[in-house]
Amino acid sequence: MEADFVIVGAGSAGCAMAYRLSEAGASVLVIEHGGTDAGPFIQMPAALSYPMNMARYDWGYQSEPEPHLNNRRLACPRGKVIGGSSSINGMVYVRGHARDFDTWADMGADGWSYADVLPYYKRMETWHDGGHGGDAEWRGKDGPLHVSRGPRQNPLFQAFVDAGQQAGYEVTGDYNGEKQEGFGPMDQTVWKGRRWSAANAYLKPALKRENCDIVRGLASRVVIENGRATGVELIRGGKKEVIRARREVVLAASSINSPKLLMLSGIGPAAHLAEMGIDVVTDRPGVGGNLQDHLELYIQQASLQPITLYKHWNLISKGLIGAQWLFTKTGLGASNQFESAAFIRSKPGVEYPDIQYHFLPMAVRYDGQAAAEGHGFQAHVGPMRSPSRGTVRLRSDRAEDAPVIRFNYMSHEKDWEDFRKCIRLTREIFGQEAFKPYAGKEIQPGADMQTDEELNGFIAEHAESAYHPCGTCRMGQVDDKDAVVDPQSRVIGVDGLRVADSSIFPQITNGNLNAPSIMVGEKVSDHLLGKEALPRANNRPWIHPKWATAQR
């Protein structure tokens, strides 16, 4: 059991690397603890609330009690299945803003500016604009990952965009193209009515090659000999065995499990490793630190017209939708129903968008629970760049034990200011003329909640994770004591070992993280193969005129 490259984790980045490395002729073994993604719960886009709530597909992680959120333990779903979190997520496709990646470069991630990463986004995509217009020159045409748009047939999707424009915000035809800022259609990783996960796009084609295979089991530690990673210890069937890597080991196990595995292998904060009884291979204080996430609220409005998805919120309608999807891959089951979106700046003086919206023509929780009684619609809204930071730490020296996850959500006053702003701006948008035929009473927070104190109480009780954890193996310069990997994603202090997933993000990006996680897998593949990076892009992204001089 050995290969040129051993990848831990068949998730978003791991699948992309398995595809590109095997395409280049290298032998690849992918270690994955989860099972198959077969079945409608994963493959039907509209069923997205099911897999992340099923122990079969999800690691089931939770945060420790969050002191600023009434000591609630928030869910932290991570995919335990081929495709990883791309097989249980909401299928929303967001690259991030150009300034996100320029900030990465400013933080020491040389070669990861927007001009550097845009060619990899284009390489990985086949984009289908659905007739809604957009920026074809900014998008990929023949990559493995199909990106499409929903039909936007419900009039509420256009009402949301029109209301944003009436409120004075920008409109964009393609937030993944030249101009992220504004209201417009939302992209989704759905193709021919199916979830187009990293498993469907990358791993399954790779596994058809003779030089790529998957190994089931729980990775328990990286084997390090004389300062070099030589393999991965695996637990399966109650027994331990070692999978050998002739060239390199790559951890792509998520922003939760990658730092956990590094620490189990003796790479991390020395004092913490000593507490766990683990011999220190190299003292890297940044391992498990810098944990970031997006929180969001659901601002819900009753609908005056019976046109929302609530009319399908019964067993008979769900059965009919499921049957249509099963036989034809069409109908409501073929979309994630997030078909309009927005990225806006919260106030003058903010350089680029710091608030994201997902619009849904129904009042319901992301996990499919607590549907409002009657017709309604909602905006998922949250700030993009919280200053709060958390940690991932070991619970014990056993790979079987879940790690200790502390996000430290809402630990800065700015978090509260930003969320109150989100609520008030959303109310302003829902109050525009475009929503006059549809908007009834405010379901939540409720019109009686107006003061800062009242809104703070609502935020503390109702803010939920958007499921975008990242940053726990931060990329930076070798002399940065808090960096875990260098700009080539090599673990600092250990040869033959890299990390390639959302854990290497220096700072969280604008929007959902699946697209940038896959991009990391694409780019790190070239580093692993010793190839020249793709030529830098010359595209100049739109930035608000006030800030145009700040563009790199």
Image: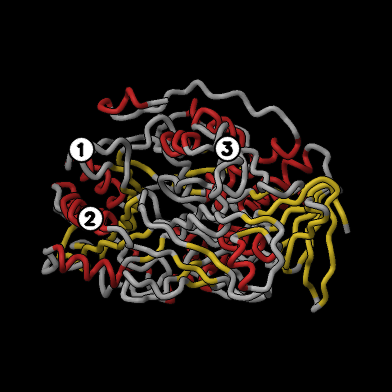
Q: How far from the left and from the top, in percent, is residue 209? A: 82, 47
Count residues near mark 2 (Cα–Cα under 10 Å), then give few for <14, some for 14-19, many for 20+: few
Query: In the structure shown, which secondary structural element does the residue marked by tag 3 occupy?
Result: strand
Q: How far from the left and from the top, in percent, is residue 8? A: 71, 57
Colour scheme in use: secondary structure
Q: How far from the left and from the top, in percent, is residue 145? A: 60, 43
- Residue at image position (72%, 45%) is 19
Count residues near mark 1 (Cα–Cα under 10 Å), then give few for <14, some for 14-19, many for 20+: few
- Residue at image position (79%, 48%) is 5
Judged from this view, the residue extending furthest toward the bottom is 238
- Residue type, label 1: Pro
What residue is pinned by disc 2? 417
Query: In the structure shown, which secondary structural element does the residue marked by tag 2 occupy?
Result: helix
Work out whether 15 lies above or below 112: below
Work out whether 505 lies above or below 112: below
* Nearest-to-viewer mark from 3 and 2: 2
What residue is pinned by disc 1? 348
Count residues near mark 3 (Cα–Cα under 10 Å), then give few for <14, some for 14-19, many for 20+: some
